[in-house]
Image (cartoon, rainbow, N blue to C red):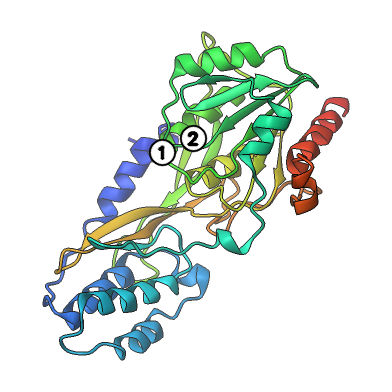
Amino acid sequence: MDMKKTGNILFVILVALMISSCHKQEEFDNDPYGNFDALWTNVDEHYCFFKYKNVDWVEIGRRYREQLRPGMSSTALFDVCAEMLKELRDGHTNLISAWDVSRYWIWEQYPKNYDERIINQYYLNFNYKQSSSIKYTILSNNFGYMYYGDFSGAIGEGNLDNILAYLAASDGLVIDVRDNGGGFLTNVEKLVRRFITERIHAGAISHKTGPGHDDFSEPYDYYFDPVDDTRIKYLKPIVILANRSSYSATNNFVSIMKCLPNVRIVGDTTGGGSGLPFTYDMPNGWTVRMSASEITDPNGVVTEFGVEPSPGCKVDMTETEMAMGIDAILEKSFDVLEMMINE
């Protein structure tokens, strides 16, 4: 099969992950040095963003290995390894033990830019519909509003038909994915297909072909097709609301939707996270998870560090506005929709 012609993102992902898992595994001792070397080596051979992030993994490994001591406790070893992984600045890279999971969270450094209470109380009046994982309504200004908080949450085709049939009477649509930490890319495809009328280029995936930092396949393009005519589509102006906690699969969703002519992105830059994960079990039973296959947006741009809002659509929520029950990002989306409608 010519993979450049496939419209199924799941097929492309599975092939990329299978191939990236085929490197020969070395044997390491189950002691502090062996476990550290196992971790460093597998990240060295599988991680996909070394060059993009300008990471000197050899220097980092040397620096952290100097902190090891024979017979050091598992807790101390975990802390050293976890700090080393943070040098990658990657929310998809974790060390997992029986008592802890290392993580790199950048989101606390930025304005939160979302308060569910404000939305529910001041904009939805605690009166909205919910179908599967999506809550939705038509606001008093006749703009539709959908909140999807988790791409791991199931969305069936019947659910989307019911939601979009109800929202068809609106003049424009706000899709809120703030604080959506990601989930299944198949749900991204399922949702995007409701907003297009023809096949679109959704992006490309490159997988590791060997242990070298430059050992990558040529990008495999993947495409999304619209749902068939028996299903409901929404083709009016759309605004996507995002913040720094819009991560992983949500980052992918925003990057694809941003390329559609009737869509604008409002709020803050997304949290990023564009690598497909690979996992490896260390000799002591810990698991390391890391970004191993690179996904680019439809324009060939790596979005590991996030997708920026559309021009003129960067907005932060202030404490004063929030205390007054005002969501400045949602308010900006209304202005943007009005402009799109009147263009």
Q: How many marks?
A: 2
- Quadrant (top left, top right, bottom left, bottom right) of the N terminus: top left
- Quadrant (top left, top right, bottom left, bottom right) of the C terminus: top right
Residue 259 visible to an observer of this rendering: no
62 with respect to 91 (left or right): left
Numbered mark located on residue 43 in the image: none
Residue 109 in the image, given as x and y percentages of width and height: 61, 64
160 with respect to 34 (left or right): right
Q: Which residue is found at the position 74% from the left and 52% from the top? A: 316
Residue 81 in the image, given as x and y percentages of width and height: 32, 75
The three-letter code of the residue at mark 2 reads Val
- Residue positioned most to the top: 230
Crowding at label 1, few (<14), some or many (≥20) Cα neighbours within 10 Å? Answer: some
Position of 132 relative to 261 (above/below): above
Crowding at label 2, few (<14), some or many (≥20) Cα neighbours within 10 Å? Answer: many
Q: Nearer the viewer, residue 124 or 278?
A: 124
Residue matched to label 2: 188
Q: Which residue is found at the position 64% from the left and 43% from the top? A: 115
Q: Which residue is found at the position 56% from the left and 25% from the top? A: 135
Position of 296 relative to 227 (above/below): below
Residue matched to label 1: 184
Q: Quarter of the image holding residue 56?
A: bottom left
Q: CA distance from mark 1 to mark 2?
A: 7 Å
Q: Quarter of the image holding residue 209?
A: bottom left
Residue 86 visible to an observer of this rendering: yes
The three-letter code of the residue at mark 1 reads Phe
Q: Which residue is found at the position 46% from the left and 18% from the top? A: 157
Q: Are marks 1 and 2 in contact (CB under 8 Å)?
A: yes
Q: Secondary structure at mark 2?
A: helix
337 with respect to 147 (left or right): right
